Amino acid sequence: MRKQTLSGILGVLAALMIGGLVLALQGFNPFSTYGALLQYSLFSASGLSAMLSRAVPLVLTGLSASIAFGSGLNNLGQPGQLVIGALSATLVGLFVPLPPLVLIPMCIAASMAGGLLWSGLAAVLRRAFAMDEFIVTLMLNFIADYFTLWAITYPLFDPTALSPMTRPVSTHAWLSEVAGINASVLYMVAATVLCWLLMSKGVSGYEWRMMGQNRLFARIGGCRVDAHYVRVMLVTGALAGLAGGLMVMGGPHRFVKGLGANYAWDGVMIAVVANNSIPGTFFYGLLFSMLQQGAIGMELVTAVPSEFIDVLQAIIVLVVVAGRVSLNLVFDHIATRKKLRESLQ
Amino acid sequence: MNVFYGLYSAMLVGATPILLAAIGGAFTYYAGIFNIAMEGMMLVGAFCAVLGSFFLHSWMLGIVSAIAGALVMAGIFVLFAVRLHTDEFLTGIALNLFAVGLTTFLLRDIFHVKGAFTDPGIVAVPSITLPLLGKIPVLGRLVSGYNAIIYVALLVTIASAFVVFRTSFGLRLRAAGYNAACLNSSGVQTPGIRVWSLVLCAVCCGLAGAYLSLGSVRLFAENMSAGRGWISLAAVILVSGNPWGISIISLLFGFFDGLTVFLQGSAIPTQFTAMIPYVATLVSLYFYSVQKRKTS
């Protein structure tokens, strides 16, 4: 655990240095660029609030991917599950006239049910026809994308809007701000804590992790791997769906075209850098949302295009992941030498 | 009859990038690499093709720079997955993300546009009219007058089948995937073979990218590979890498892709017709899985 934290910090620093080098080569000043990045995310009240809201879908889809990968499942369907979840929440928010106390939980439940349904479809195809979830969830992403685009272009289209979007959901489904921070952030933190408890304290979490490390071992040890498989699919789908629902309820209050587009692969990316650890996912989710939020301000004050952050994120992923393997070799080497010296004395 | 020709050429247009990328993926599949970076290689290829064609005023150099761009991606893959032993799947995902980020960044940085770049200065890859065959009434229209890269794709398919099944390199390639330890003990370095398979994959994906941006259209749009790399990966897995199988599957997807374009004017919303290739992938995966279950 400590090794992971250390290699993660070193990796991020190295990636930032490489990013700075890229900036310097392009003729930009890396220090003022990174300064602006921090200024508009961490060190201003509005930036911090926006950054935390932005972290909601990142962390939740990251948790979804972390739990799936950690349990040995290739659920790459977070983007699809997210938009279906968002659509479900929007539907409830549009057509159910109830007071906030009932409507908000209903919207949240609907978003989770939507995501769960979409990942459940992949689970059913796997269980019934042995279709690999890797390809199925990928293809379902595109199908969900086009389906939601159709839904907001024709049946749910807001006639007053210029681009495809739904009408705003009932104000009763809006998540309020608590001390300048959107309530969706609280749900995100709660979900993270629950996931952490589930994965590191619960029995099923233990069994899931065993499944991820060695499916055969888990089965022989008495885990019902097939039942667990379906459960992990459903849980991870619900998490991604929740991300979509919270985005609608906390942000634009309607389903806008391209809602999930910017977050499409970020969940998978965060799970990959965090090596499927739940606290790691949370912190990398915050880091990436900081970069993405700061990018907007960075573009305002420096000439660096905000797309630079996409490059920086990919560099972080590559360097941290590769660094973890190489650093582990170094750590093992040091540990072995230490042991050797002790045994010689 | 015109509808038939239209659908036929739309099928070829849709099939070519998938075919090329899938042939590239087949090389790495045989070498035992779980390579999902075709999408990223294709995207970088498409961008570099426009870059080369626009600044060097030649489609030939556009294709060369597309291949060079894809090779750089393959180089990163080699550095991380083969040299540093990073997980291949993770490297692939990171590379795909890198490709999207890099191309959008450079699109903004070099061409100062967002979304898409198109310019009369981009030289497209020309179509080729075959000298004698082109004059035959029906056959001529079926085989002649298509984009040069489509013919290259055909040659690449035949060449890849020959290389994989008829040459000693192909034997080593398959051995690297089948039993790497055995290949090592026979005195051939498996990592070396894997690097070559990635190089071949990059060349194919570069061509696929060049076709996307200089062949069927003459522009570069953000994320214009639009999941074609993933479909080609599905194609490779479905037929276990066999180039002939890949060409059949690619034509099938090309057909459905062409159908999408054709149904655009009809009453069916475009969002549903656009789903067709992805649904087709799921359906073919269904048949593959059922078949596999029966045989095992």
Image (cartoon, coloured by chain):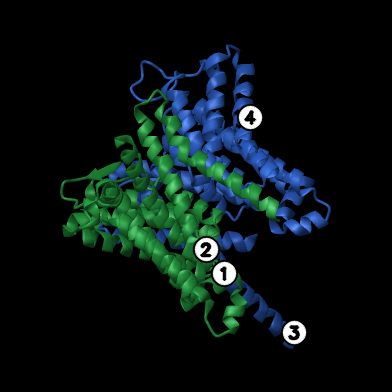
Chain colours: A blue, B green
Secondary element under disc 1, as helix, strand or loop, is: helix
Return the chain for callout 3.
Answer: A
Q: Nearer the viewer, residue B7 or B70?
A: B7
What residue appears at the point 38 percent right and 55 percent down from the top-left corner? B42
Q: Position of residue A249 (x, y in %)?
A: 52, 25
The C terminus of chain B lies in quadrant: bottom right
As measured in the structure, the alpha-carbon distance from the residue carrying label 1 to the one carrying label 3 is: 42 Å
Q: Is residue A330 visible?
A: yes
What residue appears at the point 44 percent right and 55 percent down from the top-left corner? B247
Q: Residue tagged by mark 4?
A: A113
Q: Is residue B139 left or right of residue A289?
A: left
Q: Residue tagged by mark 1?
A: B177
Please identify, in this view, whether the residue under mark 4 or under mark 3 is nearer the observer: 4
The N terminus of chain B lies in quadrant: top left
Q: Residue tagged by mark 2?
A: B29
Q: Quadrant of residue A128?
A: top right
Q: Residue tagged by mark 3?
A: A343
Q: Earlier in the sequence, mark 2 or mark 1?
A: 2
Q: Disc 2, disc 1: CB below 8 Å?
A: yes
Same chain for the residues at labels 3 and 2, yes or no? no
Label 4: how many Cα within 10 Å (few below 14, some 14–19, many 20+): many
